[in-house]
């Protein structure tokens, strides 16, 4: 529609596009199989708002880096991470609100650190810990 395009299978409404199978609504894109809402760079990404880098990323708002990451709001870094609100780093993490760091962590509210951790509310650090409310720092 408006702007500059270079490559195959590119659709540009506004901005600049470079690569293959790219759709750009607004902003600048460089890569392959990218669907961008606003300003993104990477491979196989869908971005609504913010910045994305990696493969199979879905970002509505915020920043995502890694593979198989879905972010509604906040920041995500790692593999198989889902973030609705807050910040996550690691693998197989799921967070509704708060921060998580480690492997196999699920956080609804609060902060989690470690492996096999699930948090409903509060703060956790350790392995195989489940907390509904409050703070826990031990292995179970």
Image: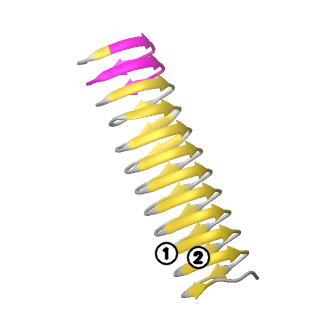
Residue 37 image-quadrant placement: top left
Q: Position of residue 30 (x, y in %)?
A: 43, 24
The circle drawn on residue 119 is 2
Please, is residue 15 above or below residue 40 in the view?
Answer: above
Nearer to us in this view, 66 or 83? 66
At 62% from the left edge and 51% from the top edge, which residue is drawn? 80
Residue 17 in magenta stretch: yes
- Crowding at dot 2, Cα within 10 Å, few <14 / some 14-19 / many 20+, comes out as many
Please, is residue 74 above or below residue 44 in the view?
Answer: below
At 29% from the left edge and 15% from the top edge, which residue is drawn? 4
Left or right: where 108 falls relative to 63: right
At 48% from the left edge and 24% from the top edge, which residue is drawn? 31
Residue 41 in magenta stretch: no
Measure how far apart labels 1 and 2 are at the Cα level: 7 Å
Residue 46 image-quadrant placement: top left
Q: Position of residue 117 (x, y in %)?
A: 66, 72
Q: How is the image coloured?
A: secondary structure
Going from the N terminus, do you reach mark 1 or mark 2 first?
1
Left or right: where 18 falls relative to 90: left
The magenta span reads 5-23
Viewport quadrant of the C terminus = bottom right
The circle drawn on residue 136 is none
Magenta segment main secondary structure: strand
Q: Position of residue 18 (x, y in %)?
A: 41, 18
Q: Which residue is mark 1?
A: 109
SS at badge 1: loop
Determine the residue located farthest toward the left in the rendered image.
2
SS at badge 2: strand
Q: Are marks 1 and 2 in contact (CB under 8 Å)?
A: yes
Q: Position of residue 65 (x, y in %)?
A: 51, 45
């Amino acid at each position: 529609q408006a702007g500059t395009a270079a490559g195959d299978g590119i659709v540009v409404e506004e901005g600049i596009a470079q690569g293959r199978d790219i759709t750009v609504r607004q902003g600048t894109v460089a890569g392959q199989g990218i669907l961008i809402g606003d300003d993104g760079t990477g491979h196989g990404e869908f971005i609504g708002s913010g910045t994305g880098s990696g493969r199979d990323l879905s970002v509505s708002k915020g920043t995502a880096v890694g593979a198989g990451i879905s972010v509604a709001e906040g920041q995500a870094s790692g593999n198989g991470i889902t973030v609705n609100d807050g910040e996550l780093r690691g693998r197989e993490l799921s967070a509704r609100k708060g921060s998580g760091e480690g492997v196999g962590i699920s956080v609804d509210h609060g902060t989690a650190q470690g492996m096999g951790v699930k948090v409903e509310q509060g703060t956790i650090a350790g392995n195989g810990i489940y907390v509904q409310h409050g703070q826990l720092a031990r292995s179970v």
